[in-house]
Image: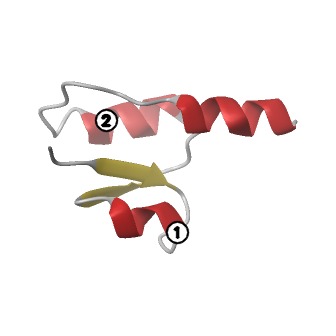
Amino acid sequence: IETVGTDMNPDAPAFQFADDKIIASTRDAEETWEEVKKYRITLIVYQVLRKIDERE
């Protein structure tokens, strides 16, 4: 399994666990989607995005 992480912070702690990374705001769906389309994605884990929304 290869993983791709996404965050606007290039030094995000979770990137150390990802095989590749997308530098994009998790709140900018269009920007993220444009980058995600470059990969052959079979599963998206979105729980982290939920946690961010719950904080606000």
Q: Which residue is mark 1?
A: 13
Which residue is most to the bottom? 11
Q: Quadrant of residue 32?
A: top left
In terms of depth relative to the viewer, which is nearer, 14 or 22? 14
Rounded to the nearest angstrom, the CA distance separating label 2 from label 1 is 23 Å
Residue type, numbered disc 2: Glu
Which of discs 2 and 1 lies nearer the camera? The answer is 1
Residue type, numbered disc 1: Pro
Which residue is most to the right? 56
Camera sees residue 27: no
Taking the spot 31% from the left edge, 59% from the top edge, the residue there is 18
Taking the spot 56% from the left edge, 31% from the top edge, the residue there is 47
Vertical position of residue 44 compared to residue 15: above or below: above
- The kind of secondary structure element at disc 1 is helix
Dot 2 alpha-carbon crowd within 10 angstroms: few under 14, some 14 to 19, many 20 or more: few
Taking the spot 41% from the left edge, 64% from the top edge, the residue there is 15
Quadrant (top left/top right/bottom left/bottom right) for the N terminus = top left
Q: Residue 34's mark?
A: 2
Q: Quadrant of residue 31?
A: top left
- The kind of secondary structure element at disc 2 is helix
Camera sees residue 7: yes
Q: Residue 45's mark?
A: none
Q: Quadrant of residue 35?
A: top left
Residue 17 screen position, x and y as percent: 35, 62
Image side of residue 39 versus residue 7, left or right: left
Image side of residue 55 versus residue 13, left or right: right
Residue 25 screen position, x and y as percent: 55, 48
